[in-house]
Amino acid sequence: MKKQKSKKMASKRARGSKPASRKLNLRPSTARAILTKAAGTNPQRVRAILQKLDEAYPDVTCALVHENPFQLLIATILSAQCTDVRVNLVTKELFQKYRTPKDFAYADPNELEKDIRPTGFFRNKTKSIIGASKKLLDEFGGEVPRTMEEVLTLPGAARKTANVVLGTAYGIASGVVVDTHVARLSARLDLSHNTDPRKIEQDLIKIIPKEKWILFSHQLIWHGRKICQARKPRCIECNLERLCYASDKTV
């Protein structure tokens, strides 16, 4: 009788028990950490990040000083491997000397190299600027085109340049600008695990609403310059600190 009773009790316990994998006796802090780390691109977390960026940078725009789409194109080409501050110092005089695509297209290459030398890689940038200016004159009536496909045909214009020009000059959300700041912050905020700019952009456009693509890029760039700096992020001043679990946090 005892054996039968014990078998029934064991069977009852087996039927009523839950899978062992669901019984995790974790401390509250450990459980929170697991839930947080599993929520990198969770829509609710992404919305919270966007809200915090809106609070900190509601009206930011491109830091490159320009008066028209063409000037923005030239400034963006010059910004490769160079700070926007230095580019703005160079273009302040450059855009007074060369005012139109025709001025750049038929500029003396040696002289233009000297004019843009402080931005670095000045020989390649000179070739790109002259080549892009000539193509604008020959194929686009001297106007910067309004599609990604067309902008990418211009010498020196990759997706970053095209996204900057289309988004800032024309308000066309063709993608997300991925520069060094956007790449760094996307990794720290666990929004992308890729290192290639094209793959990072593809990751971001999947989780960021299209109407936010233009502003989001500017917000991350400004946040990367002011707060989430490469060598020593100023986490104590960051309004995203509670949403961030980067390994190199300073708090």
Image: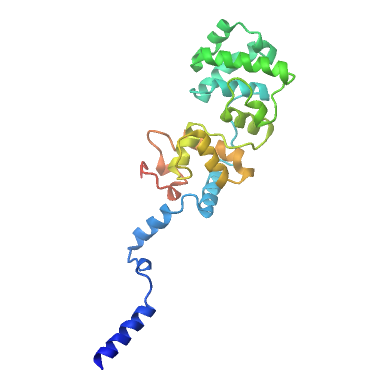
Q: Residue at x 45, y 45 (%)?
A: 190
Query: Camera-side residue: 142 or 154?
Result: 154
| Residue 225 shown left or right of residue 101 in the figure | left
Residue projecting furthest to the right: 141
Q: Quadrant of residue 204?
A: top right
The answer to whether one can see residue 163 in this image is yes
The answer to whether one can see residue 227 in this image is no
Q: Residue at x 38, y 56 (%)?
A: 34
Q: Residue at x 70, y 30 (%)?
A: 146
Q: Residue at x 29, y 85 (%)?
A: 7
Relative image position of residue 6 (x, y in whole percent): 27, 87
Residue projecting furthest to the left: 2
Relative image position of residue 27 (x, y in whole percent): 32, 63
Name above or below for residue 129 compared with residue 165: above
Name above or below for residue 163 compared with residue 118: below
- Viewport quadrant of the N terminus: bottom left
Q: In the rendered picture of this protein, how many numbered marks are placed on residues?
A: 0
Name above or below for residue 25 compared with residue 176: below
Query: Camera-side residue: 228 or 183?
Result: 183
